[in-house]
Structures are given as C-alpha cells and as structure tokens.
Image (cartoon, rainbow, N blue to C red):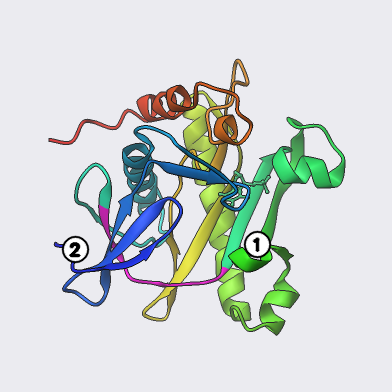
Amino acid sequence: MKKVEMLYEGKAKKVYTTEDPDVLIVDYKDDATAFDGQKKGTIVGKGAINNRMTNHIFKLFEKDGIPTHYIEELSDRETAVKKVEIIPLEVIIRNITAGSFAKKMGVEEGIVLKRPTLEFSYKNDDLHDPFINRYYALALDLATEEEIDTIEKYAFQVNEIMKKYFDSLGIDLVDFKIEFGRYKGQVILADEVSPDTCRLWDKETHEKLDKDRFRRDMGNVEDAYNEVFRRLGIEDRK
Ligand code: TMP
C-alpha cells in the first residue's frame, strides 16, 4: 500500500490518499499541541508509540466486536485505515474526576465517579470544540439518533474493555476521548487511542503517564509515553 498524496495535515497526524479510494494512510507525528494549538512542542518518539498503541488497542476492540477503521500497520508510524467520514463529535468518557470535569464541577481530581460519564464536544476548531449534547447534535444534523445510540453503546463498551486491560497493566483509566466515522453505512471507531487522548495514572503511585505531563509542564513526558508503551508489551516490528 503506497501513499499517493497528502489529503490533510492535522496537529498530530498527516493523512494520505492511496490508490484505493476506500483506504487512507495515517502518518503519526511527534508534534504535540495543547489548548487549541496555543501550546506547541515535540514529544520525541510519540508518533511511533501512538501509532502502535492505537493499533494494538483497536485489535482488542475488534476481537470484542467493536468495528474500527484499522486495516494494517505499515511501519512504526504509518497505518492503513478505512476512509471514513468523521462524525464531528468528540466522545469523552470519564471514570475518575480530572481535567475540565474537575474544574467545571468544582471537585478535586482523583475521585472515582459513582458511574462512568459520557459527554460530547463539537469538533470545531474555530469554536474551540464546545460542549454539545444529543439534542444539539440532532438539531444541527451532525448525526442521526441511531448513530448517537450506537456511538454511546460502543463508547461504554470500549471503556469497559480498556478499563480492564489497563488495570492488568497497573494503570487506572481516568478518562479518554474517542471519535467515530461513517463507513459504508456503518458507524465505526476512528482516530486514535493513546496517551495523547487518554488520562492514564499509575495505580500505585498515581503518577500521570499521559499528555497532561506536556499540558502542565510536568517534565518526563517522553518517559511517561515510553512507560505506557513498555507495559503494553508490544513486540518490536521486524
Ligand atoms: P478534558 O478533561 O480536558 O475535557 O479532557 C478529557 C479527555 O479528553 C482527556 O483524556 C484528554 C482528552 N482530550 C483530547 O483527546 N483532546 C482534546 O482536545 C482535549 C481537550 C481532551
């Protein structure tokens, strides 16, 4: 599978067309941004870690019947994926209070929630990804009711799979963001699952092993990404 031309360059990935109109190649960068791109930096090795971690986890989802865009890992940083039409909703699931939830709700970080929450942000950089609910999404025709039902069902299933899996690696899954796309009439999981898009805390020490180290200038950012990758036990590519 070969890249034909660059279709799009995002903050963390480049996306290329291929000879197959249904297939794209994503190429993960080491670039990191936060706060709507206001803060910029590099996390050395992040592209390869996020690519390989996403593929590893998407394969777990597929095994449990959750469809994803994953086709084939082509290199450390490149993966062939199904070309979806992204549904412009960021889907955020939380198990433990942190980040914008803690701030908005006036609670400390680190409280285990009585049950997981789900929220949507409208994927729109000009508007800074505002909070949006099901009724807004339907009224603005961003997705159908059936699609939103499917998204919510998959999102909670993905949470259960990941919570259990990260727990076995000595990590608490605090919260995460996922995105879905439309592919041949189906809703499937797209984008990535990585320390960029999840909050991952060591179960014992509560050390942050995710992008908050970059967002909050905590140092040892690369070490955190490498530690998560090491615990995943993904074998070297041949
Ligand atoms: P938040 O607490 O800042 O709302 O973030 C919730 C989760 O979503 C957290 O795991 C980080 C992830 N996230 C993204 O993946 N992209 C984003 O642009 C933001 C703001 C958060």
Residue 230 position, x and y percent, is 36, 25
Question: The residue tagged with tag 2: helix, strand or loop?
Answer: loop
Q: Earlier in the sequence, mark 1 or mark 2?
A: 2
Q: Dot 2, crowdedness within 10 Å: few (<14), some or many (≥20)?
A: some
In the picture shown, does residue 224 fall above or below 104? above
* Image-based side of 139 in relation to 76, left or right: right
Check disc 1 and report its element: helix, strand or loop. loop
Q: Judge from the rendering whether residue 87 lies leftward or rightward of residue 61; answer left or right.
A: right
Ligand 1 is within 8 Å of the C-beta of the residue at disc 1? yes
- Residue at the spot x=34%, y=57% of the render? 14
Q: Nearer the viewer, residue 44 or 195?
A: 44
Q: Mark 1 points at which residue?
A: 129
Name the residue that disc number 2 marks: 3
Q: Quadrant of residue 68?
A: bottom left
In the image: residue 223, left or right of residue 210:
left
Magenta extent: 79-88
Q: Is residue 23 above or below residue 118?
A: below
